[in-house]
Image (cartoon, grey):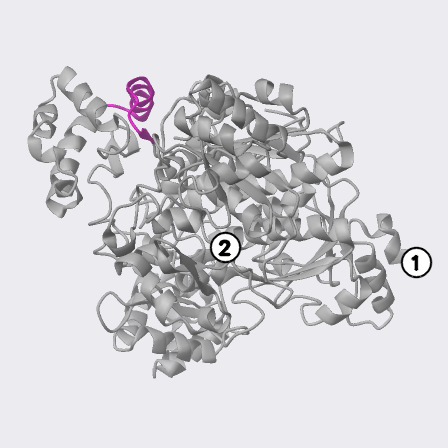
Amino acid sequence: MKPDFLKGVRFADLTWAGAGPFSTKIFSDFGAEVIKIESSVRLDSVRTGGPFKDRRFGVNRSGYFASRNTGKKSVVLDLKSEEGRALVFDIIRKSDVISNNFGPGAMDRLGLGYDAVRAVKPDIIYLSMPMYGEDGPRAEMLGVGMTISAVTGLMWSTAYGPGDPVGPGTHYPDHAANPYHAAFAVLAALRRKRLTGEGMKIDLSQVESTINFIGTAFVAQAMTGEEPPQASNASGEMAPHGIYRCKGEDAWCAITVGSDAAWAEMARLMGEPRLADDTRFASTAARIGNREALDGIVTTWTSACEAGEVAERLRQAGIPAARVANSRHLVENDVQLAGRGYWQRVEHPELGNSLYASPPYQVDGERVELSRPPLLGEHTREVLSLLLGLDEARLDALETSGVFK
Amino acid sequence: MAALRKPKQPQPYDGMRILDLTHRYGVYAGKLFADLGAEVIRVEPPDGLPDRAALPNRDPRFAFLNANKKSIVLDFGDPRAEARIDALVSSAGAVFIERDGPLYDAIGRLRAANPRAVITAVSPYGMTGPLADAPASDLVLQAAGGIAWMSGRIEREPLALPFSQATMVGSIYAATVTAIALHHAEATGQGHLIDVSVQECIAHSLQNAIQVWDLEQRISIRGGEGTRDATEDIFPCRDGFVFLASPLAVGNSWKSLVAWMVEAGHPSGKIFSHERWSSREWRLTREAREEFRTAFTAFSTLFDKEEMARQAIARRIVMGPASRISEVIDDPQLAHRDFFTQVEMEDGALVRFPGAPFKLTPQVWATARAPALGEHNASVKELSS
């Protein structure tokens, strides 16, 4: 299905890079008109960041950009020019939402600060999502997603053990907490606008948003006064609980055993039923206390078997387990994702028939079909003509004077 | 720290009732709605939804994820409860259900009771497919969805993310798609059924790993060798760790960093002025990583986190402290923004909670403590009718 649930909602979308466009993509995927206003002089960093089709650079060849911008329209305007800015204001006048993820003050410098926008569109929903918020002593700190992991405690807590932090291997806050907290806030603002007729300013500090994503750690710290443990893959409530080496190169299986009965079942599967009665492992507390010995025994078993086979046998016995999947496995071999039609291919003039993850749910029993991402500036003339009513002569004049860049 | 008051301004989800029968992977979704004004009611069997049994009293996870919700008790096994369930569903805009919890197998009935409602079903692997009934846990879903593969050191096992991230990712996708479906359902009177797979939610959060495989047939892997610049990592300083990112492509971060070392007369400044550090390709190699780590650590361990943060801001270097949780609560920026809030527990004790994930103007966000089992039985009229 190509849902039209958000038909009639329009964005003037100035977001770029990872987190911002990921939050507006969910709107275009559900039928909103998301007008991505970008520049061919200062390109969106994911257009230039790759991976690229055939490993060949091109502003329309980045798969990363494609995955964050499905179904959007691209309008190229020189925001530093008088005329370019005037056109942006004309688009804003006809939009419900204006979105950006620039650093603090950047929108003001472009003449697009909240007050300036509200002056022309009093009921605007104005989304900003700078790293640390709009103001304050560290507002000017520069960061990438991993910096957000660092200053929130997520990096410290993603660790192999006490004092040995590693951090998430991706810019994780950019791909979950921040885009979707932002999208949720915009959806709430849209409902409030329907109730009251009023707009709203949303100042999403990506640090504050990410702290909520690990909010349970903060409440635990507040209740106990203690730093949450750097627990690795282990759990304070279960054992075995970990990622175990399997047969083959860099092959792993995650296993969690939640009860004595499950442990007895696993012991039987390992061909060592006596382990269930071994006093070192007879209760959860005992298994946690003797974790090292326990993990050694489990590893002896898993490292002789294929990861998929370990997982399947444990699942059949009612024990949670899964191969640690990499991207290739997910795309080529994961029967569950394939069985639910999770992957889609979408035609694109430069990317060819490339692969996309569906929105991670089915709606009324169907997949949300994605529309391809826009070429740079593909919709400039279309939007200015259909939305703003500019005629061909005017568009030609603007093009000649270099406003479309 | 801000005290909590119900905002005077109308809240976005005023007048919206949501029934919440989640107990694990969907629990945070209801909190997001409740803190913006929805009446979110946990509908629980007499001994509570499974999370009450799994988590001890006043468990911080329960307290945070269920903040601001109500709780009522219904004996789902009692035939007399059926009319009450129908009346409740009929009064709700949305119903969250979850696998291994009540009403997950009663979707037809829920939809018949209220065709205008959005029914959101959260489950580890989705409602269909060969693993629809497979046992799961947070760690296992992080493995099955591909995020566990992405973290850790290459010589060690993959490392999952802490603090129940399968719950957080599953919940935030469930919340946003439910809000979208509500937008449509309220406008048209047409309800929807949403089938959220937590595995798919995790697989949707892998940065660009899927495209890297599809377009370049490379598998993104933990450790970042071959993909991450030598400078992009966590490094020790005098009193802990900092995270640094100074690849050549990121503004002046690299130039400023080297200039700082040279200015300080530190020998590492000379090492990094060598021309091979202007090669992007070389900076991706193991050799570069090792050389950078040794020489940068010799410099970074001269300073504490506070000084590193100050210098990073002044010199426009992409660098920040890798704070402990108990240090984040004293972060000067968060203090300036009065971010943390206080929630009054049943016994009157005030506990520090994270503030809003987004700062809204007008201010329409507020939270409150999680409910005791059945605390709101008397105030929900569909229970007595």
What's the residue at 73%, 43% (across, down)? B38
x, y percentage for residue B230? Answer: 19, 40
Amino acid type, residue under disc 2 in the picture: Ser
Residue B371 in view: yes
Q: Which mark is residue B385?
A: 1
Span of residues in magenta:
B301-320
Chain under disc 1 = B
The foreground one among A168 and A276 is: A168
Q: Give the structural element (helix, strand or loop) at label 1.
A: loop
State whether residue A309 is above or below residue A209: below
What's the residue at 48%, 21% (across, down)? A83
x, y percentage for residue A340? Answer: 51, 70
Locate the N terminus of chain B by quadrant: top right
Q: Which residue is mark 2?
A: A371
Q: Give the structural element (helix, strand or loop) at label 2.
A: loop
Residue B241 lies in magenta, yes or no? no
Amino acid type, residue under disc 1 in the picture: Ser
Chain under disc 2 = A
